[in-house]
Image (spheres, rainbow, N blue to C red):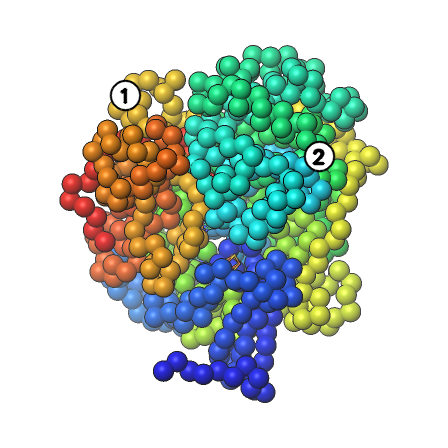
Amino acid sequence: MPKVIDLRDPDIEVRKSMCYFCHTNCGVLAYVRDGEVVYIEGDPDHPTNAGGLCCRGNIALKHLDHPDRINKPLKRTGEKGANQWEEITWGQALDEIAERLAAIKDEYGAEAVATAGGTVRTDDWARRRFMNLFGSPNSFHNALLCWIPTFMIETAISGWSPFLSDMENSRVAVIWGANPGASTLPAMRGLTDLHEKGLKLICIDPRFTETAAHADLWLPIRPGADLALALAWINVIIDEELYDAGFVEDWCYGFKELVEHVEQFTPEWAAPLTWLDPELIRESARMYATNTPGNIQWGTSLDQQGKPSGAAIHARAILRAITGNIDCPGGDLMPGPSMEYTVDEELEANEYLPEEQRAKQLGSEAFKLCSWPGYRLISDIAREYWGKAPTAEWMCEANAPAVFRAILTEDPYPIRALLVAATNPVNSYGNSREVLEALKKVDFLVTNEYWMTSAALYSDYVLPIAGALERPVVHNNYGCAASIVTGERAVYPLHERGTDYWFWQGLGLRLGQGEELWPWANEEEAYFDIVEPLGFEVDDYNGFVREVGFYFPKPEYYRYKEEGFFTRTGRVELYSTVLEELGYPPLPQYCGPVENEVEHPELAEEYPLALSTAGGFMPFHHSEEFNIKELRYLRHDPYMEINPATAARLGIEDGDWCWVETLRGRIRQRANVTNAVHEKVVLVQRGWWYPERKEICGDDPFGVLESNANVLTATAEEHCDPISGTWANRGLLCRVYKAEEGGLS
Ligand SMILES: Nc1nc2c(c(=O)[nH]1)N[C@H]1C(S)=C(S)[C@@H](COP(=O)(O)OP(=O)(O)OC[C@H]3O[C@@H](n4cnc5c(=O)[nH]c(N)nc54)[C@H](O)[C@@H]3O)O[C@H]1N2
Ligand SMILES: Nc1nc2c(c(=O)[nH]1)N[C@H]1C(S)=C(S)[C@@H](COP(=O)(O)OP(=O)(O)OC[C@H]3O[C@@H](n4cnc5c(=O)[nH]c(N)nc54)[C@H](O)[C@@H]3O)O[C@H]1N2
Ligand code: SF4
Ligand SMILES: [Mo]
């Protein structure tokens, strides 16, 4: 019999917690009795979810005390990967890890220690602080796939990323390579409401998605060909004089050069590259340019195309500017850093990392914008205006593929230790086989996790991490915008779990970083330092959460009219002086998808289908939640989408297990035979592994190489975007064939 809980029980206390199974950060009311969370529900007063929770949010109690959770620090006793452990205390774990890191630093230098993060879930500023004080420039994460190229390129061009759309006042929204219908459900609800009231929607996606189903125009683009489309839109808008001549004249730099540059990029030029009808390209460009004010939504797609990514992001930024859809009611707004609360950059202790160590950051010579050289240039300009840097410095991290290669090749120098926190690298970084090899090879590996992942399995130490109900949560857009949402701890960490913050602070103190450098006794104290400058009359962090909770300042429009744009020229730099100074083309130059039939016809003979390894889908979040059987009931097997004509030609029927293969390797997923994709397009699901396979499967732990999309993706230096260093998940070539022996699961 399930326990009956009377929520009126006077011994129950309600805590204002927050869900962090995705970045939507819905408010959660946690009902706590005797130190146990007995019930949760969506917080009806929370601005994001107004009481709702999705299926992931709703299973938080199953996540909290799931039998697979790691509950004590583990020290490896057998061979690497043998899954033999001794349970130890946090104190012993931190002492021994600190000792080992100190020895590596002595022998090889601080740069031989690297840290890997994921999509930020926890105190990434603390990881960065630890690394700066330790002296290593080699922290990295996979957010290069997720907004960093966008933020940095847009900031280079217009002084800040115009990433907050003033949707309610818009007449048209371009949903470009995003699918809020599966990835951001509360935003989708807003979009469909506004669409009913007349907002026009243009959806650019190779798949007919939940979002495309609501669009006025759907552009089923060839994966990875977005740069050609963006250039053709600019061409149409200029050729048909649909641009905002006044804004261009007063506020844009380099329009004349742009006009000459884009003359060649007609819709007829773009049609064979994008697989779109030239008339559809014209019609959609007109719809965006004439229904002003309008906005373009950020989606991960442009950040994940490797080589063409930077130019595509640049071209998208030009579209906003020449239509005058920037910093105006109904357009894309530039929030600027928070001047009111403490931003991450102020907590990162960046001033402690010596110049000569910065110069050693892996990948920063090849990819200059999202590493030290570009960050420095942009932050110098921003500081002149704001007195603050544009964003947390974790936007200028080492290049992940360069670090994995340095582990494997010791070139340009060896990486001896890797500390993994809040990421599942084999699943979510590119070229999984190489990542797994690197994890097996690195001398010293430590992972902070909820579960036994493939990274944890090969680790020397695994630290058990507390989830969102067990720690306070602040989400502040990393300091890139002035808004902030907060949640309090529902209960102290269960079992012997700790938090990522404890880990970095505990390690730092043991390595002599000094109490004055880690002055906070716990997260609540640190977070109070973040919110206190907001000036609300509260005494501590929990008081802030209960009495204030969130802070969304009113949008400001036309800020540039007073001070100009926060660039060197004071204008939006269509022709970018920052990119030029870093040695990149100042205008977006065309290049094709990383693998394509036009430039690589021989490859296309062998691998004839265009592949994207994309797209969030419910109920999973990247590789998370696969352990939870209630969610696995909803999706037991991985599916790839393939067109009926192609499937018939290949003898594949709906539901068949198939191999999808690229030059990097092959994976197996089941066929979802559907008209939602073009005859030459295949889309595979990302994130897949099989944690239920508790026996460790030799070289492929938990089947992490079996169905995982990132076995297929491309991270070689020539595949990466030269500007940002992001790698290629979208716009590859593959072949598909039936897997004779069927699936294993
Ligand atoms: N359910 C669920 N929700 C999530 C996540 C999750 O894993 N699962 N992840 C969260 C995170 S961290 C993020 S960043 C957001 C991301 O959310 P979104 O920005 O919406 O991005 P994705 O879902 O990765 O992909 C969006 C769409 O891009 C399309 N696409 C694929 N290749 C291309 C291409 O080459 N060009 C174009 N134009 N489109 C292409 C795909 O078909 C897909 O529909 O979602 C968040 N929400
Ligand atoms: N092929 C392909 N690859 C992609 C994408 C794609 O569209 N296609 N999308 C990319 C995007 S947008 C993103 S953001 C990244 C996401 O990449 P990751 O952030 O690496 O995502 P996950 O694979 O979900 O791994 C997160 C891990 O952290 C653990 N975890 C969760 N919360 C915490 C915490 O608070 N502390 C600690 N220590 N651990 C925690 C989880 O158990 C999980 O194992 O993946 C990228 N990879
Ligand atoms: S997982 Fe669901 S409930 Fe949790 S924050 Fe995301 S959308 Fe909200
Ligand atoms: Mo992401």
The image quarter containing residue 100 is: bottom left
Mark 1 residue type: Glu
Query: Mark 2 = which residue?
Result: 293
Query: Is 47 in front, or is 453?
Result: 47
Residue 611 percent across, percent down from the top left: 36, 33
Which residue is rendered at x = 74% and y = 70% of the image?
A: 538
Q: What secondary structure is found at the residue carrying circle 1?
A: helix
Going from N to C along the chain, the mark reached first, 1 or 2, is 2
Residue 592 percent across, percent down from the top left: 45, 22
Q: What secondary structure is found at the residue carrying circle 2?
A: loop
Count the numbered circles shown.
2
The image quarter containing residue 234 is: top right
Q: Is residue 5 left or right of residue 152?
A: left
Label 2 C-beta lies within 8 Å of the nearest ligand 1 atom? no
Which residue is rendered at x = 62% and y = 36% of the image?
A: 200
| Residue 507 visible somewhere in the drawing | no
